Image: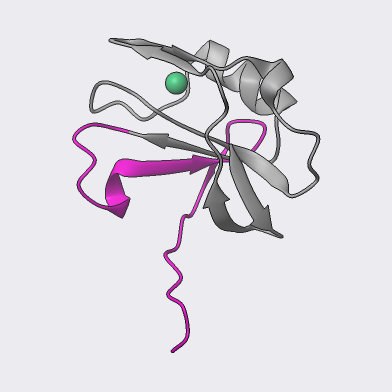
Amino acid sequence: MLRGEGDTITEILVIPESLYGEGFSSIRSYHIPLDKTIIGSVHSHPSRNNKPSEEDLIHFSQSGRIHLIVRQPALDIGDIACYDSTGRIMQLLKKTKRQ
Ligand SMILES: [Zn+2]
């Protein structure tokens, strides 16, 4: 899951007992903390496709407003697609910390 402020992602939360394997992943929703700072989710696809599946769109509609899908090989920010809760693609910008 993604933690953030507004539309800025500040942290990735790993949910306990998340399952993953070749071609699938799942999380146990009852392990997601009731936390208003959770703004969305992130998961990866095992291919060059980072478009949401039908199951992804259902998950997006139920779990926040910003969702990232990482395609393989994850080499740079161009391999990450960002979607809103309806599956509409959004622009993902890398923000650097001020020194
Ligand atoms: Zn997916």
Q: Is residue 34 left or right of residue 29?
A: right
Which colour style is shown?
one colour
Residue 15 location, quadrant? top right
| Furthest residue toward front | 16
Give the answer, above or below, for where 57 lies relative to 41.
above
Q: Nearer the viewer, residue 25 or 13?
A: 13
Query: How many numbered tags mark residues here?
Result: 0
Quarter-of-image position of residue 54? top right
Ligand 1's quadrant: top left
Instruction: Report the side of 71 relative to 56 (left or right).
Output: left
Quadrant where the N terminus lies? top right
Specify whether 67 is left or right of 94: right
Q: Is residue 21 above or below residue 16?
A: above
- Residue 33 in the image: state x and y as whole percent: 74, 33
Q: Position of residue 10 (x, y in %)?
A: 57, 58
Magenta stretch mostly in which secondary structure?
A: loop
Q: Quadrant of the C terminus?
A: bottom left
Q: Which span is picked out in magenta?
A: 71-99
Q: Quick check: 30 above or below 99? A: above
Q: Residue at x 29, y 50 (%)?
A: 78
Residue 51 location, x and y as percent?
Answer: 41, 27
Q: Which residue occupies 24% across, 52% down?
A: 76
At 27% from the left and 21% from the top, the residue drawn is 46
Q: Residue furthest bottom?
A: 99
Q: Is residue 75 above or below residue 42?
A: below
Residue 94: image x %, image y %? 42, 65
Q: Residue at x 57, y 55 (%)?
A: 9
Q: Answer whether residue 93 is magenta in the image.
A: yes
Residue 80 lies in the magenta stretch? yes
